Image: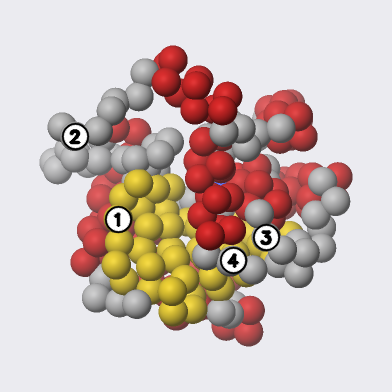
Amino acid sequence: MKGTPLTEDTYDYICRLFPAEDDFLRNLNRDAEAAEIPPIHISPEQLAFLQVFLRSIGARRVLEIGSLAGYSAIGMARALPEDGMVICLELEPQSVQFIRRKAEEAGLSHKIRVIQGDAAESLRNLGAEAPFDFVFIDADKPQYKVYMELSYPLVRQGGVIAGDNALAWGKISQESIEEPDVRGMQVFNRALAEHPGMQACLVPVGDGMAMGVKL
Ligand SMILES: C[S@@+](CC[C@H](N)C(=O)[O-])C[C@H]1O[C@@H](n2cnc3c(N)ncnc32)[C@H](O)[C@@H]1O
């Protein structure tokens, strides 16, 4: 294998030297836990990666599919210009209220809009909000391919669609596995890798981020 496997020490070094998580986001995680929202947000080094990436493509409009407590949405909104926007598609009403409150506390409510409902339904009605520079898929895994197909027409040329958990908790290469979440990620990764309208890669940051740029 080429590359350097991560150890705890190396991981701590990365997070210390390139921090993306501040007191606000740490408190957000604590408040989310108190509200019994599960701690399944992206990791700090994934957020650092996304922020650098968004700035590098000059992103203004971001679409997030699955927003939980707003950790990644607030983190991404911070990397957008003042007239930028993160549109969040989130199923759970409790999460929607939580994200709106945190966006307000963060002084970012002008940059974060949350749409409550099933993401596939919302995506079918988002044409007027297009084009997006970046789509971040981080919701129910069996639907990732559907989300990719529905969001593809909403992305500008040179824009990117990314899916978190592309390594499926270390199980992505187990071809005969039947766990629906792992199967969902395998189906998504393949569809992205073979999409004729995108060039794709899988970045092994956190639990893996598969990314395709629209040609
Ligand atoms: C892994 S969490 C998102 C974490 C978030 N991106 C972060 O890093 O801070 C997945 C979220 O997807 C939402 N979700 C699941 N199924 C959904 C659906 N069909 N439509 C919209 N959101 C959905 C869940 O309610 C949950 O909040």
Q: Separation of disc 2 and disc 1 at Cα?
A: 16 Å
SS under mark 2: loop
For the residues bearing labels 3 and 4, Cβ distance under 8 angstroms = yes
**Taking 94 as reference, is 174 above or below it?**
above
Comparing labels 2 and 1, the label whose residue is closer to the camera: 2
Does the closest atom of ligand 1 sit within 8 Å of the Cβ of label 1?
A: no
- Tag 3 or tag 2, which sits nearer the N-term? 2
Q: Please tell me the numbered disc located at residue 201.
A: 1
* Left or right relative to 82: residue 19: left
Going 63% across and 84% down the picture, which residue do you hit? Answer: 128
* Residue ID for mark 2: 2
Q: Residues within 10 Å of mark 4 (few under 14, many from 20)?
A: many
Q: Which mark is residue 80?
A: 3
In space, the residues marked 2 and 3 are separated at their CA atoms by 34 Å
The reply to whether residue 139 is in sight is: no
- Amino acid type, label 3: Leu
Q: Residue at x 61, y 46 (%)?
A: 72
At horizontal 31% and vertical 50% (from top left) the residue drawn is 202
